[in-house]
């Protein structure tokens, strides 16, 4: 949060009320034990995502997210990579989407991405012509 241009960096503090109890518990568990238990899509993207300042946590989160990409959560993952400026993981997600283009492009999630982040959707579609 402090290494990217996020509100926490600008303010110099974290509002713990922005985090749910489970996320705080998992963060503390990781900080003290180095382990992450039974990750789920929501909790992993909340804990640190691929952007974690802790390289070990970032790698674990990236691996988890990559292994759990689906046509229904790929658009959320793409937005996450854009928000946290994770270009390597962004390429992984974009390739995943392009490999499943008919399924993803016809989904409600893609329509929402088009409405909310047209530039990111266009950038992803443009990669199809560069392959």
Image (spheres, grey):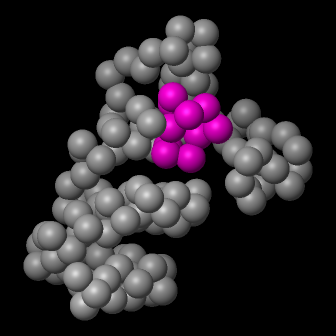
> Does residue 42 appear in the picture of this structure?
no
Front-most of residues 89 and 104: 89
Q: On the image, which quarter does residue 120 sit in?
A: bottom left
Q: Is residue 125 above or below residue 97?
A: below
User: Which residue appears at 41% of the width and 56% of the height?
Assistant: 89
Give left or right: position of 20 versus 8.
Answer: left
Q: Is residue 99 above or below residue 29?
A: below
Give left or right: position of 81 versus 113.
Answer: right
Q: Position of residue 96 (x, y in %)?
A: 23, 64
Q: Quadrant of the N terminus?
A: top right
Front-most of residues 57 and 14: 57
Front-most of residues 115 and 65: 65
User: Which residue appears at 71% of the width and 54% of the height?
Assistant: 4
Q: Quadrant of the C terminus?
A: bottom left
Is 64 inside the magenta-drawn segment?
no
Q: Position of residue 7 (x, y in %)?
A: 77, 55
Q: Which residues are magenta?
A: 49-58
Q: Main secondary structure of the magenta part?
A: helix
Q: Is residue 28 above or below residue 7?
A: above
Q: Position of residue 48 (x, y in %)?
A: 55, 39
User: Which residue appears at 31% of the width and 83% of the height?
Assistant: 127
> Does residue 32 appear in the picture of this structure?
yes
């Amino acid at each position: 949060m402090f290494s990217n241009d996020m509100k926490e960096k600008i303010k110099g503090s974290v509002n713990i009320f922005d985090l749910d109890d489970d996320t705080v518990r998992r963060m503390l568990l990781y900080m003290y034990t180095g382990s992450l238990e039974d990750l789920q899509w929501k909790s992993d993207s909340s804990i640190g995502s691929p952007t974690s300042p802790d390289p070990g946590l970032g790698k674990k989160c990236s691996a988890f997210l990559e292994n759990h990409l689906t046509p229904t959560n790929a658009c959320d993952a793409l937005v996450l990579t854009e928000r946290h400026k994770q270009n390597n993981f962004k390429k992984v997600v974009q390739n995943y989407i392009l490999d499943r283009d008919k399924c993803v492009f016809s989904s409600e999630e893609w329509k929402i991405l088009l409405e909310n982040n047209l530039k990111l959707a266009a950038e992803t579609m443009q990669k199809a012509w560069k392959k």
